[in-house]
Amino acid sequence: MVMYGLLSYVPLFVQAVIGSSATSAGAALMPLYSATSSRAPSTASGSREPAACAECAARALVLTVGTVLLWRMTTGTSSFAAALYTFVAGLGFGLMNQVFTMSVQNAVPRAEVGAATALTQSSRALGAISGCRSWA
């Protein structure tokens, strides 16, 4: 739900509060997408290991720092700072996506991994729908 909230919040903030154009507001999401997609493939291998808990905590910290940076934006925030904060949040999402999925897959018997993964994805979709609907 946080991801969909940021996808709605960042362009609206950049356009309405900072005063950038609609094109610039949409472009403000590019750092989020590039950071998320660049980090996600490299995180899949290490997230299966239970000993990687400290690494998972560090990944969660990056996600937390990114969302706090975005939360603390004000009218004085520049477009560059908003893009930088968006990049940090995207980096955190890219680092954590596989951890969320693998933790569910590791918690169920092997025969139920497909069902657990499907439930995780559908729960994310329902959370996104609920979150976006509550903002409307």
Image (spheres, rainbow, N blue to C red):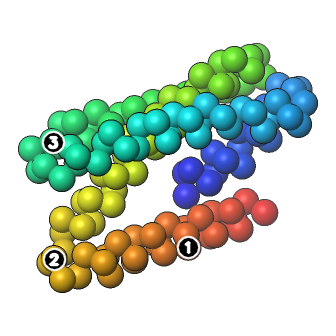
Tag 1's secondary structure?
helix
Q: Position of residue 31 (x, y in %)?
A: 61, 31
Q: Which residue is found at the position 22% from the left and 36% from the top?
A: 55
Residue 52 is marked as 3
Q: Which residue is found at the position 86% from the left and 34% from the top?
A: 23
Q: Can residue 78 be spotted in the picture?
A: yes
Q: Which residue is mark 2?
A: 110
Measure the alpha-carbon separation of dots 3 and 2.
21 Å
Among the two numbered marks 3 and 2 on one chain, the one whose residue lies closer to the N terminus: 3
Q: Which residue is found at the position 69% from the left and 17% from the top?
A: 80
Q: Can residue 67 be spotted in the picture?
A: no
3 vs 1, front mark: 3
Please state if 109 lies on the left or on the right of 34 as rendered. left
The quadrant of the picture occupied by the N terminus is: bottom right
Q: Which residue is found at the position 26% from the left and 59% from the top?
A: 102
Please state which amino acid type lies under the numbered disc 1. Answer: Leu
Tag 3's secondary structure?
helix
Q: Are marks 2 and 1 in contact (CB under 8 Å)?
A: no
Please state if 77 lies on the left or on the right of 64 as rendered. right
Tag 2's secondary structure?
helix
Q: Position of residue 50 (x, y in %)?
A: 11, 50
Q: Which residue is mark 1?
A: 126
Among the two numbered marks 3 and 1 on one chain, the one whose residue lies closer to the N terminus: 3
- Residue 41, located in which quarter of the rendered image? top left
Give the vertical position of 80 relative to 54 (above or below). Answer: above
Please state which amino acid type lies under the numbered disc 2. Answer: Arg
Q: Are marks 3 and 1 in contact (CB under 8 Å)?
A: no
The quadrant of the picture occupied by the C terminus is: bottom right
Please state which amino acid type lies under the numbered disc 3. Answer: Ala
3 vs 2, front mark: 2
Measure the alpha-carbon separation of dots 2 and 1.
25 Å
2 vs 1, front mark: 2
